[in-house]
Amino acid sequence: MPAISALTYNEAIRALSERLRAKGKTGKQIVCAAMRKLLSIAYGVLKSGRPFDAKLALAH
């Protein structure tokens, strides 16, 4: 459910979704990619100790 919510409200996840949809990926593949991206973002925030920065998440 967090991934589905992020697809609606998070700029970085929404951009990822649009890129994958343009490549012809299915809905489940997009949601799974969003889950992985959220985990990567959470790990990066915990590891670095800095707050979330959407510009960094959009850079990848």
Image: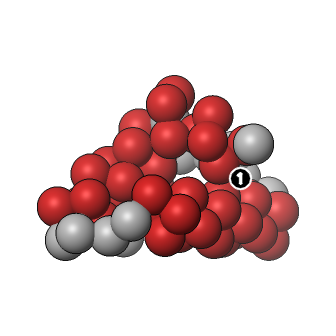
Task: List x then y, in percent, for residue 27.
Answer: 45, 58
Residue behind mark 1: 50
Which quarter of the image is occupied by the N terminus? Answer: top right
Q: Residue lying farthest left? A: 22
Q: Foreground: 18 or 54?
A: 18
Task: List x then y, in percent, for residue 45.
Answer: 73, 59
Q: What kind of residue is marked 1?
A: Arg
Give the residue at x 71% y 52%. 50
Give the residue at x 39% y 65%. 26
Give the vertical position of 54 relative to 41 (above or below). Answer: above
Which quarter of the image is occupied by the C terminus? Answer: bottom left
Task: List x then y, in percent, for residue 3.
Answer: 65, 48
Question: How many numbered tags mark residues here?
Answer: 1
Q: Foreground: 39 or 28?
A: 28
Give the vertical position of 47 relative to 57 (above or below). Answer: below
Give the vertical position of 21 relative to 9 (above or below). Answer: below
Indicate the secondary structure of the residue bearing disc 1: loop
- The image's colour scheme reads secondary structure
Q: Is residue 4 left or right of residue 11?
A: right
Q: Quadrant of residue 11?
A: top left
Q: Is residue 56 visible?
A: no
Give the vertical position of 32 relative to 58 (above or below). Answer: below
Q: Foreground: 55 or 30?
A: 30
Give the residue at x 27% y 51%. 18
Q: Quadrant of residue 48?
A: bottom right
Give the residue at x 32% y 70%. 25
Q: Is residue 26 left or right of residue 39?
A: left
Q: Residues within 10 Å of mark 1 (few under 14, many from 20)?
A: few
Q: Is residue 16 visible?
A: yes
